[in-house]
């Protein structure tokens, strides 16, 4: 397991705010650096390692990195509130701890700006936040992870009201609108108007189960629960989210590959042509099981399952050659509608063929982040 820390330390040693080597989307497309949910995944991983090890080098790296991306007025680099992009909120999660430790006013200003977006985010008729302005009336599982842990932490830390009902509503709406009654799994996306070309006419849901999106949603649940558990009261809300998490994990476990303990890119089609064991979704589910075990919100057997997945990732996906570590088999990106796919299947229609077509890359933060999250939880469990 110590190889995971060596891998992370190697990545940090070769990265800087000006050149984060873990953002493969930006690197492959030669895009300029900016405030990004992908960097958010990585800096959160580094913060989690600080929390697990108390190694000040991790905290120093996180602070130096974030300082480059936020000016003295609290403006994140390249951030545009008017895009109403749920992804843009994710990196804001790292600011809570940095502000608590350093008291830099620009961190608080940035938190306020990002929370303003949360308040103004367009909604579906059910009250769910649109994933982006670009995707009107659509809910994606990804968005729950990007926004809800941030929203509840801001509300309970700085909010004028301690009402968390809107956060709970976001999860409730997903469980009511996006859950498949046969498998218990959640579809990647939902269009409340049922007019998106990828939406099923009867349900408004997309057609398949993408493991990383299930991981995003499960991480949203466990991270939100952790924040709630640190506050008195909210007994009903805690029980509600715990029930949602238990139901989802129980639903996904039957699709675990019996040979490796990992999960496939398209969750329920292990025998599908070109389906593969995908790193980021597997890592996210490992993290959720380990964290939920530490917090005693999932049955005790999930500690062993989560650890088995993490060890399997080290065995099957973490490669070392000539002293250099590589984390492989990470889906670069997947979505619904909007821009073209990055593989040879250009229409992001939620089909099996689409999810399999998106590029598979090495060393992307969407895989590294959850991998390190899981390891940080494993380290903390060793001390219990």
Image: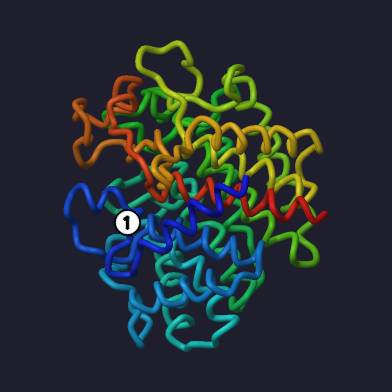
The reply to whether residue 155 is visible in this rendering is yes
Q: Quadrant of the C terminus?
A: bottom right
User: Looking at the rendering, which quadrant does residue 151 occupy?
Assistant: bottom right
Q: Is residue 62 above or below residue 319?
A: below
Residue farthest along the front direction in this orientation = 322
The residue shown at (46%, 72%) is: 61
The residue shown at (33%, 66%) is: 35
- Which is nearer the eye, 106 or 48? 48
Residue 159: x, y in percent?
A: 59, 76
Judged left or right of residue 199, residue 255 is right
Judged left or right of residue 102, residue 25 is left
Q: Is residue 193 above or below residue 293?
A: above
- Which is nearer the eye, 180 or 166? 180
Residue 64: x, y in percent?
A: 42, 77
Q: Is residue 72 above or below residue 318?
A: below
Question: Where is mark 1, residue-wise?
Answer: 21
Judged left or right of residue 364, residue 150 is right
Q: How is the image coloured?
A: rainbow
Q: Quadrant of the N terminus?
A: top right
């Amino acid at each position: 397991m110590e190889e995971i820390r060596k891998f992370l330390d190697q990545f940090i040693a070769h990265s800087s705010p000006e050149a984060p080597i873990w953002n493969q989307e930006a690197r492959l497309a030669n895009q300029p650096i900016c405030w990004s949910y992908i960097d958010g995944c990585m800096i959160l991983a580094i913060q989690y390692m600080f929390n697990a090890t108390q190694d000040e080098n991790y905290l120093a790296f996180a602070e130096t990195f974030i300082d480059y991306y936020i000016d003295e007025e609290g403006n994140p680099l390249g951030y545009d509130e008017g895009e109403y992009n749920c992804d843009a909120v994710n990196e804001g999660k790292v600011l809570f701890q940095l502000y608590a430790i350093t008291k830099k006013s620009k961190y608080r200003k940035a938190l306020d700006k990002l929370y303003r977006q949360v308040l103004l985010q367009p909604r579906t008729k059910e009250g769910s936040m649109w994933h982006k302005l670009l995707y009107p009336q659509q809910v994606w599982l990804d968005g729950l992870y990007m926004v809800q842990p941030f929203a509840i932490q801001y509300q309970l830390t700085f909010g004028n009201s301690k009402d968390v009902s809107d956060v709970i509503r976001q999860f409730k709406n997903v469980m009511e609108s996006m859950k498949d009654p046969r498998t218990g799994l959640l579809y990647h996306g939902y269009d409340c108007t049922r007019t998106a070309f990828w939406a099923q006419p009867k349900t408004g849901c997309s057609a398949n189960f993408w493991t990383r999106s299930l991981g995003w949603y499960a991480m949203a649940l466990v991270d939100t629960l952790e924040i709630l558990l640190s506050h008195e009261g909210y007994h009903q809300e805690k029980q509600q989210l715990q029930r949602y998490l238990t139901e989802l994990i129980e639903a996904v476990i039957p699709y675990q590959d019996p040979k490796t303990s990992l999960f496939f890119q398209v969750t329920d089609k292990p025998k599908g042509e070109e389906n593969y064991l995908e790193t980021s979704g597997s890592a996210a589910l490992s993290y959720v099981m380990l964290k939920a075990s530490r917090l005693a919100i999932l049955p005790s057997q999930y500690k062993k399952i989560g650890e088995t997945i993490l060890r399997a990732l080290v065995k099957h996906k973490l490669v070392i050659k000539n002293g250099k570590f590589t984390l492989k088999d990470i889906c670069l990106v997947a979505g619904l509608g909007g821009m073209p796919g990055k593989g040879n299947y250009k229409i992001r229609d939620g089909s099996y063929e689409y999810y399999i077509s998106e590029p598979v890359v090495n060393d992307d933060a969407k895989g590294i982040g959850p991998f390190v999250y899981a390891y940080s939880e494993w380290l903390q469990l060793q001390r219990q």
